[in-house]
Amino acid sequence: MKHSESRELSALDLYDELDPHERERLEAHLAGCADCRAFAARLRSGLGAARPPEDAFGPPPAEWLAELRAGMRAMARPRARLRGWLAAMAGFAAGVLVTSLVAAGPRQREAEVEGSRFAVQELPPKAAARGSLAQLGVLLGR
Amino acid sequence: MGADASGFEQLVAEHHAGVLRICRSILRDDHLGADAAQETFLRLWRNALGGALPEQVGAWLRRVAVHAAIDLARRQPASDPRSEARPAGHDPGPAPAAIDSARARELRATLDDAVRRLPEGQRTIFLLRHEAGMRIAEVADSLGVAPATVKTQFARACLKLQSRLVAFRPADERP
């Protein structure tokens, strides 16, 4: 094993990140290498001594939790609005569909004007407008 | 709110400390760490609203916390010094249990300075292992990198930092 590899393994050993095979190889190297043993000792008193203090976190602070809840509500609101909007759109679409179905089939509608009966056939919008003019002509006695 | 808010808050209580520790280790700042932790839980809540919580919530939270903290760190102005010195408006919970000696604090300050000089990838890996206490395998999973790569980069970061700590002398031992 090269010294450079031994030093990398010593660093990993400091954090208990060696697998059994790596540990075995490191120990074999250290047994015969005073330089790497000295390096491992310096590592323990250097980086090993600079471990962070154990942070003892308690439950989430009230202020932080209040902000989180506000964020959660803000996220839930657009979804509720979206659901309402989708429901309204679905209702509108259903209305348009029903109206279209009713309007699409040619059928007779009867209207009674000043005692005389006449029939107006349901037509597309432009034709219906012409029909209205014709109807107006009838009303005007043409 | 639709999804089970009280059940969600139990999850928050359970994972808050771990998520905050990860975020603070990367951001080195109480306020920013708390912001990134909140962002992490809000992303989980968005999933809950969509009707799907991840199967392994702990691992999912670690991954999201790491990336939320990295994103937030990158959005900080370059001139903004990372700041243990900043006044802490956010109370992250009880103060650290251990009160270190002056020497240990000095050593950690020297280490902090050296950590700042590491390349970003090595710095993130080192902080997640050293500060947040994640295992190499967890760091690899969170970053989406092979464990062998994380292991190598972590070891190299340690050696760089050790070389800078060699020059460290506590104030009371300086000539």
Image: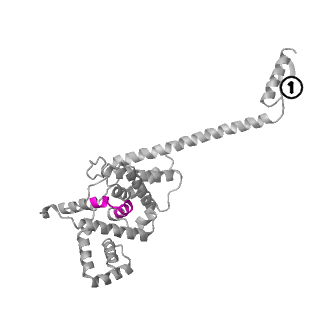
Q: Residue at x 27, y 65 (%)?
A: A51
Using residue B102 as the reference point, say whether residue B142 is left or right of it. right
Picture layout, residue B98 above or below residue A30 = above
Characterize the magenta stretch by its predominant secondary structure: helix
Sort mark 1 into few (<14), some (14-19) or many (20+) by Cα contacts within 10 Å: few
Q: Determine the image quadrant of residue B166.
A: bottom left
> Which of A93/B102 is in front?
B102
Q: Determine the image quadrant of residue B18.
A: bottom left
Helix, strand or loop at mark 1: strand
Check disc 1 and report the residue beneath it: A119
Q: Quadrant of the C terminus of chain B?
A: bottom left
Percent position of residue B79, x then y: 32, 48
Q: Which residues are magenta?
A: B113-126
> Which of A70/B106 is in front?
B106
Q: Is residue B114 magenta?
A: yes
Percent position of residue B127, x then y: 34, 62
Picture layout, residue B130 above or below residue A74 = below
Residue at far top of view: A141
